[in-house]
Amino acid sequence: MTRSLAAVLADTAARRPDHPALVWESTEVTYRQLWRLARERAGVLRHHGIGPGDRVAVLVPNTPDFPAVYHGVLALGATVVPLNTQLRSAEIEFVLRDSEARALVCDASALEQGAPAADATGAELFTVAGAHPGAVRLDAPAAAPVPAELVPVDPDGIAAILYTSGTTGRPKGAMLTHRGVVTNIEVTAVSPFAVEPDDVLLGCLPLSHTFGQTCVMGTCFATGATLVLMRRFDAASALELMTGHGCTVFMGVPTMYHALVEAVTSGAPAPPALRRAYSGGSALPVPVLEQVRRTLGCEVYEGYGLTETSPVVAYNQPGMPCRPGTVGLPVTGVEVAVARADVEGVVELLPAGEVGEIVIRGHNVMAGYLGLPEATAEVLVDGWFRSGDLGVLGADGYLSVVDRKKDVILRGGYNVYPREVEEVLLRHPAVEQVAVVGVPDARQGEEVCAVVVVRAGSTSGEPLAAALVAWSRRHLAGYKCPRRVEFVRELPLGPSGKVLKRELTAALAAVVTS
């Protein structure tokens, strides 16, 4: 029977109690200590009425508090709703309302945006590493008894709800089961990640994101390895931590690899103990991958996954030929195929070598989108999950991702959904029309570009472009904000009046590469 997601940490704490689970700044936290912290957090939450089936949002950065709160919520049989600390109050408020979260656990550094959202929705506010009027200190647990046992859960019950947006811009909560996430952790810990108990992983990916949460934290804790935490990625600091702590495994998105290569090229020492590296989130161009190999002195494995697939679907894997330009082979228990992308309501599979929509089935596929049966039915078809990504399967089973059917920009490993950004920009008094598209960028993979038609009486140019960027930053997480603003007299439209974004993207890309 599948164990619960909380048991991933609990079992290792019983098996390797005195081995370092975390390294944070100058402090080591053993598995025994981390599991104790998680149970203490669970005790306070239970004392305030949180129990099985309740949803608890977590707005905490990469500190020891994140894994402690995350596993503490799960230990109660409750569902965890991790949030990126870059989100603004309105974005947090939406998630709290949509998920019907009973509580929000907020780090001191995120209280400015988290507390108003909790107040607006009626979610009970708990804090770690900081106090706030009316909030309960989760890191002062002396008054609450510490639970001795895990609350039993249904393996097909919802462990986590991770929010991701569709082309409509409305964030959707992907409901991930204990069985799905735990199996994905257990499978990928063996291959492709091949984590050994003596490995030391650098935790620079946000733990609130599925890549950092499952692939880094989950596989590390399942194996009993050690996680060196970084609050936020910085190339020079990452290299210093990897060298100082003897990190053997690095997982990151292409922007991180660009920064690491630049830092080493500028004179920083490459980490001597690094055994292997893994890339995901967006495509890592083959020339860059080869440069990373030379610079870091280890193999770089590229793979593919989605929030809705817990997340890992396929990866280049140790022990098998590594094929740059592909995302490797499906992981154990996951089946991948390519289907006709222009047919709705049914999955019509295509033979090897043909381009179509990537479809997935297996243990890793989500239970559905929270409260959105129609959106769920659109993507869960004939037992397959329709990814919205276009790809091709080789005769040897290796998968290549060709393009995306979805209207989504992948910036630095984060999904940016144009309509969400467009809706913010359209609220600016100088904007008549706007189309947000992605343009190629050597560092970020894609950069967010807003193409704007200004209102009569307004003047386009650099001052307005700067004002629109500043406007976006007040209303959106930083990674969603356009770094480039272009002005046009009119947007290209198709026969139905839809903006022809492919034409815009092609024109802007031509300017970038010319």
Image (cartoon, rainbow, N blue to C red):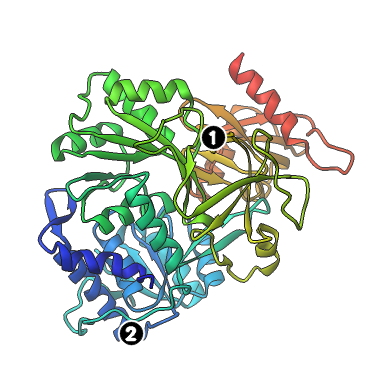
Mark 2 → mark 1, Cα distance in angstroms: 55 Å
Q: Nearer the viewer, residue 455 or 509?
A: 509
Q: Position of residue 456 (x, y in %)?
A: 78, 37
Residue farthest to the right? 495
Q: Tell which of 35 and 383 is nearer to you.
A: 383
- The outermost residue toward the left is 18
What residue is at 31 percent from the left and 53 percent from the top? 219
Q: Pick the quarter of the image with the C terminus.
A: top right
Q: Is residue 163 left or right of residue 384?
A: left
Q: Nearer the viewer, residue 235 or 384?
A: 384
**Left or right: 370, with 248 as reference point:** right
Of tags 2 and 1, the one toward the viewer is 1
Q: Secondary structure at mark 2?
A: loop
Residue 48: image location, x then y, percent:
33, 84
Residue, disc 1: 396
Disc with the residue nearer the chain's start (2 vs 1):
2
Considering only vertical position in the picture, is 80 above or below 342?
below
State whether residue 32 appears in this view.
yes
Question: Residue 195, percent across and down?
Answer: 27, 47
* Residue drawn at point x = 78 percent, y = 49 percent: 343
Q: Is 412 left, or right, of 76 in this rendering?
A: right
The residue drawn where x is 27% and y is 40% is: 249
In the rendered image, the vertical position of residue 13 relative to residue 272, given as above or below: below
Residue 489 occupies quadrant: top right
Return the mark for residue 48.
2
| Residue lying at 30% horizontally and 61% vertically, measured from the top left | 66
Q: Amino acid at mark 2?
A: His
